[in-house]
Amino acid sequence: MHTDAPKGFFKRLVDNDIAWSFIHSPAAIIAATITLVCVLATMLAPWLAPFDPFDATQISLWDGKLPPSWIEGGQSQYLLGTDNQGRDMLSTILYGGRLSIIVGLAAVCLGMVLGVMLGVISGYFGGAVDALIMRIADVQLTIPGILLAILINGIGRTLLPLEMREDFAIYVVIFAIGLTDWPQFARVTRGATLVESQKEYVQAARVIGLPRWLIIVRHILPNVMRPVLVIATIGLALAIISEATLSFLGQGIPATTPSLGTLIRVGNEYLFSGLWWITFFPAAALVVLVFAVNLLGDWMRDALNPKLR
């Protein structure tokens, strides 16, 4: 009996529509593999990185601006060269990628929780509550996301004491990007809630006298999460780009803390001096990561859409 259990589990997994779609989609497999490699490499940066960019004893200004090891003047211990501070580029990309992914995930989670909560409330209760929430979402959607994130980030930094601004910069960026993203989650969740709330099982739950909060948690939420997961996957790529954009503009992560955006900004100052590697390698890492996550989101959108199966 115990030996058949794993076989039964894997058989159900393979027979599942989503698993079948993933197995038969080369693009999804490649995107998932690249995403997994990027996430694991960045999360294991303390063990994989040749140097620690936060350790001053491992940084030498005499080794600053060295080219990649295969170019004349490069050194073998710095595979991708060094930046203006003498930090190993490969190490800073691994640590910076980890920070960018963490900020992106946290911002998406914040936007998803806020948007799903407001969307379900709006769709289930309707009336004035629905009108108020949706009008706020409509107004916010008329403002370009990056401009709104800059505004929220600026207000958040202004409210903090001067000595706390650098320490809390990451949290302010997460808050700014998360508040920018919630309307998309709210609108999709509201539409799904309007459909689910009219179905027979929800009507039956109302008839037997279940509390509204229990109906929402037990019956509505589990059935509106499919489109939310698709938006969250695509939103992760957008959140990573938003963090990189804010940092590139000097409104995000401080330059002393490496993220992909700060590395690109620092390298851009030396781009016309011929030090192309300081910008190129972080930018290439950002492009690969965002492209893979977007491909994965496109596959999830098709796989979770029953009309396409």
Image (spheres, helix red, strand yellow):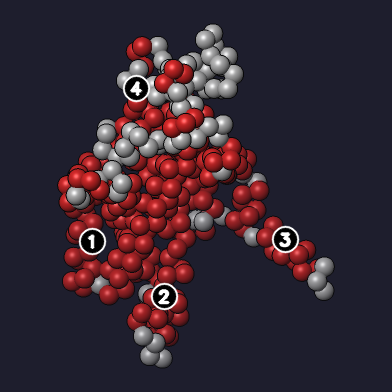
Q: Residues within 10 Å of mark 1 (few under 14, many from 20)?
A: many
**Nearer mark to the viewer, of 2 and 4:** 4
Report whether 16 appears left or right of 103.
right
Nearest to N terminus: mark 1 or mark 2? 1
- Mark 2 and mark 4: Cα distance apart in space: 49 Å
Furthest-front residue in this view: 57
Q: Which residue is mark 4?
A: 268
| Circles 4 and 3 in contact, beta carbons < 8 Å | no
Judging from the image, what secondary structure is the residue with disc 3 in? helix
The answer to whether residue 285 shows anywhere in this view is: no
- Picture disc at residue 217: 2
Q: Nearer the viewer, mark 1 or mark 4?
A: 4
Q: Does label 3 or label 2 sit earlier along the sequence?
A: 3
- For the point 59% across and 56% down, the residue is 18
Distance in Å between CA atoms under marks 4 and 3: 49 Å
Work out how far the residue at label 3 is from the one at label 2, CA to CA, in angstroms.
30 Å
Of residues 290 and 126, the one nearer the viewer is: 290
Give the distance between the C-alpha atoms of the residues marked 1 and 4, in whole angstroms.
40 Å
Q: Nearer the viewer, residue 207 or 269?
A: 269
Which sits in the foreground, 216 or 56?
56
Q: Nearer the viewer, residue 131 or 217?
A: 217
> Label 1 to label 2, Cα distance in Å?
21 Å
Residue 10's disc is 3
Residue 169: % across, % down: 29, 45
Looking at numbered disc 3 in the image, what kind of residue is underneath it?
Answer: Phe
Secondary element under disc 2, as helix, strand or loop, is helix
**160 is higher (above) or lower (below) than 121:** above
Residue highlighted by disc 1:
134
SS under mark 1:
helix
Position of residue 259 in the picture relative to residue 33 (left or right) = left
| Rendering coords of residue 130 (x, y %) | 23, 68
What is the count of numbered marks?
4
